[in-house]
Amino acid sequence: MRAIVIGSGIGGPVAATALRRAGIDVSVHEAHAGPGTTLGAQLNLAPNGLAVLRTLGLLEAVLAAPGTIPNSTIDFRSGTGRRLGAIDDGSTALEEGLQSVSVRRGELQAALARAATGHGVTVEYGRRLVRHTDTGASVVAEFEDGSTEEADVLIGADGIHSRVRRGIDPSAPAPVYTGLLDQGGWTTAPGLPTTPPSTSRLVWGRRAFFGYQSAPDGTVYWFVNTPHRDLDESTLRSRDAAWWKRSALDLFTGQMPEITAILEASEEHWFAPRAVHTVPTLPHWVRGRVGLLGDAAHALPNSSGQGASMALEDAATLAACLRDVAGPEAALAAYERLRRPRVERIIAEGTQRGDLKLITNPVGVFLRDRVLLPLVFRMVARTEGHSWIFDHRVDVDARVGPVS
Ligand SMILES: Cc1cc2nc3c(=O)[nH]c(=O)nc-3n(C[C@H](O)[C@H](O)[C@H](O)COP(=O)(O)OP(=O)(O)OC[C@H]3O[C@@H](n4cnc5c(N)ncnc54)[C@H](O)[C@@H]3O)c2cc1C
C-alpha cells in the first residue's frame, strides 16, 4: 500500500511515521518552503499525546527540542493579580516522560519531520495541494506546481483551512471564527517575572486573557487572547506589529504589572494575531480513500490544550486501522468510528471554557471572577478532573479488532 499525507505540521509527520512502521510506503507534502522552526508560538502536549510519541520512538526528540518545558500546574489570576485558584493536572504522578509540557510549535513540527525522515518517510516542502481525485481504485493528488502523485490512500493533515476537507465534501461547514485573536511569543530580559517550576500563570484580565510561564533558562513564554467580535482579515493585516504591540499593552493598562513588563520586553515581530477558528462537527471525516486528521477534521477550542494531542492520537489510530482493517475505505471508516466520540466530548468541554474569554463587560467580569471560576475550580478538584482525557492511550502496535 502507498499513502500520501498532505501537511507536515504536527499530525502529518506522526501519521507518516506510524504508517511506515505499519509497513506502508508514504510521502508527506507540505506547502511551506521548509521545516518552519519559527512558525507559531507555544502549544501544549498532554500525557495522552506524549504517550503516542513514545510508542513511535519520537518522544526523546520532542523533549529535547529547544524550548520544551514541563507545564503541569496552572495558577489562575484576575487582572489585578488576585489568586482565583489553581489546577494541578496530576501528570507529575505519571511515568517519567509523560508529564505535560509546553513546546515551541515550530521546533516541534521540525523535530517531528526530522524524525519521520529518519524512519524512511519522504517529506517534500514547497508542495501545496490544490485538489485530489478519488478514482475508486486510487487517489491522485495535484499540486500547485503542476505535479501529481498517485497512491492508494490520501490523508489530509492540512490544518484548519484544509483543502482536502473541501475535496471530500464541498458542502462541509466552513471553519467558524470564535471571536478571539491569539498572539504570543517569548522574550528574555533581565528582571522579568518568573513562575514556579512547571507552572504557567493564566490571567483573566478585564479586557483580554493573558498567559505566561518562565523557563529555567529565564526565557518567558506568553500569549494574549483578545475578544474581537467582527473579524475583518484585511483590517487585521493592515495594522503593523507596532500597532498590535501598543494595543496589547493598552489592554492590560492598570492590571498586573508583570504583563506590561513581559509585553514591553518582547520584540515586535511576535505581535501578529491569528484569528482563532474552530471546525463545526463535520458530517464526514473520511470519504472513500481519503481521510482527515487533526485540525482538518476537528479543530478544538484553543482553551482545551488538546489540539496537538488529538492530532497525534488520530495519526496513530489511523495508521493502525490502515494496517489491520482490510481495504482502505473500510479502514478509514473504522478510524472515524473509533475517534469521533472521544474528540467530540473533548470539544464540548473546551468550548465552555473558551466562551468565558469573551466576557468583557464589568458585571460579567465580576461574576466570572467571583462566582463562575471559583465554582469551576472546585468542580475540577472534586471530579475526576482531566484523567479521562490524560489516561487514554493509543497503542499503535495493538491490533484493531472489528469496529462497529
Ligand atoms: C503556521 C501555524 C502556526 C500555529 N501556531 C500555533 C500556536 O502558536 N499555538 C497553538 O496552540 N497552535 C498553533 N497552530 C495550530 C496547531 O499547530 C494545531 O492546532 C495542532 O497542532 C494540530 O495540528 P495539525 O497537524 O492538525 O495542523 P497544523 O499544525 O495546522 O498543520 C497543518 C499543515 O498543513 C500544511 N498545509 C495546509 N494546507 C496545505 C496544502 N494545501 N498543501 C500542503 N500543505 C498544506 C500547513 O502549512 C501546515 O504545516 C498553528 C498552526 C499553523 C499552521
Image (spheres, rainbow, N blue to C red):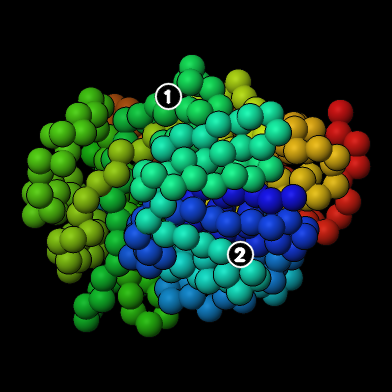
> Which of the labelled discs sits on residue 174, or is there none?
1
Residue 343 relative to residue 29: left or right: right
Q: Residue at x 85, y 40 (%)?
A: 326
The answer to whether one can see residue 267 in this image is yes
Vertical arrangement, residue 397 with respect to residue 80, above or below:
below
Residue 12, image x and y in percent?
56, 53
Which is nearer the eye, 5 or 247? 5
User: Are the residues at dot 1 and dot 2 in contact (C-beta closer than 8 Å)?
Assistant: no
**Dot 1 crowding, Cα within 10 Å, few <14, some 14–19, many 20+:** some
Between disc 1 and disc 2, whose residue precedes?
Answer: 2
**Dot 2 crowding, Cα within 10 Å, few <14, some 14–19, many 20+:** many
Q: Which corner quadrant holds the C terminus?
A: top right
Alpha carbon distance from label 1 to label 2: 31 Å
Residue closest to the far front: 147
Q: Residue at x 22, y 81 (%)?
A: 190
The answer to whether one can see residue 200 in this image is no
Residue 177: image quadrant is: top left
Residue 230, image x and y in percent?
23, 25
Task: Please tell me whether mark 1 or mark 2 is closer to you in this view.
Answer: 2
Which is nearer the eye, 95 or 63? 63
Q: Secondary structure at mark 2?
A: loop
Vertical arrangement, residue 130 with respect to residue 3, above or below:
above
Residue with the mark numbered 2: 121
Q: Residue at x 30, y 56 (%)?
A: 184
Q: Amino acid at mark 1?
A: Ala
> Which of the labelled discs sits on residue 372, or is there none?
none
Q: Amino acid at mark 2?
A: Val
Residue 37: image quadrant is: bottom left
Residue 123, image x and y in percent?
51, 62
Residue 238 relative to residue 326: left or right: left
Residue 266 relative to residue 325: left or right: left
Residue 201, image x and y in percent?
40, 59
